[in-house]
């Protein structure tokens, strides 16, 4: 029995890796071969290959954000929230072993997979998908502005000011530009979560 899994949470930090660790440990205890791909804040790690997907008996996706399932067409696929990957890894693996999960079809969702998605709040899922892509812009923008003010700022009666001709002024402007992308990125990936790639067109 060969299983594959993907874990991902809105912020791509703690829950992504907790679910991955719990699933891997549970698989080891149950004597099941498993590889877990994490889609966290630093990108995709331990990425599943085409050969591994072909050879897999089933795939488990424990995620609270949108995950591209196109590569799993025709494979048995169980999609749940990331919390279930943390709390019920043995139960998920047992379902996969028993074959009690639907085969993924791209065009039309099976009744079972549709019911699974209904258990998750769709508004929360779509919003968190947008937030997860927006967070890096906030972090990087804030960091650049903070570094620019710390290293290039000069004290004035109005507070710290970076001279216009300074190199650090450019860094500050890049940071400010990063903040300006927040809303478009949030809106774009909420739309992507709702309507997939066509949602990015508007």
Image (tube, helix red, strand yellow):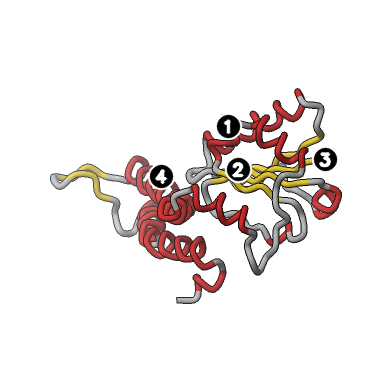
Residue 86 position (above or below residue 168):
above
Task: Identify the mark nearer the N-term, 2 or 1.
Answer: 2
Query: Mark 4 — residue?
Result: 143
Query: Mark 2 — residue?
Result: 62
Question: Total marks drawn?
Answer: 4
Task: Identify the mark nearer the N-term, 1 or 3.
Answer: 3
Q: Are marks 3 and 2 in contact (CB under 8 Å)?
A: no
Query: Mark 3 — residue?
Result: 2
Whether residue 50 can be seen here = yes
Q: Are marks 2 and 1 in contact (CB under 8 Å)?
A: yes
Nearest the viewer among 178 and 98 is 98
Q: Position of residue 50 (x, y in %)?
A: 81, 55
Whether residue 134 can be seen here = no
Q: Position of residue 6 (x, y in %)?
A: 66, 44
Q: Quadrant of residue 71?
A: bottom right
Task: Identify the mark nearer the N-term, 4 or 2.
Answer: 2
């Amino acid at each position: 029995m060969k299983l594959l899994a993907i874990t991902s949470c809105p912020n791509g930090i703690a829950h992504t890796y907790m679910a991955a660790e719990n699933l891997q440990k549970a698989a080891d205890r149950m004597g099941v071969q498993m590889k877990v791909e994490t889609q966290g804040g630093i990108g995709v790690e331990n990425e599943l290959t085409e050969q591994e997907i072909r050879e897999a008996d089933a795939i488990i996706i424990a995620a609270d954000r949108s995950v591209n399932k196109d590569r799993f067409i025709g494979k048995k696929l169980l999609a749940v929230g990331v919390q279930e990957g943390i709390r019920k890894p043995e139960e998920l693996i047992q379902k996969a072993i028993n074959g009690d999960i639907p085969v993924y079809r791209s065009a039309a969702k099976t009744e079972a997979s549709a019911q699974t998605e209904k258990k998750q709040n769709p508004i929360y899922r779509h919003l968190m998908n947008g937030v997860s892509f927006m967070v890096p812009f906030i972090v990087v923008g804030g960091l650049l502005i903070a570094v620019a003010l710390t290293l290039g700022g000069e004290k004035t009666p109005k507070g710290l000011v970076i001279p216009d001709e300074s190199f650090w002024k450019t860094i500050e402007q890049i940071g400010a530009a990063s903040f300006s992308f927040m809303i478009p990125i949030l809106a774009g990936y909420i739309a992507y979560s709702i309507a997939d790639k066509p949602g990015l067109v508007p």
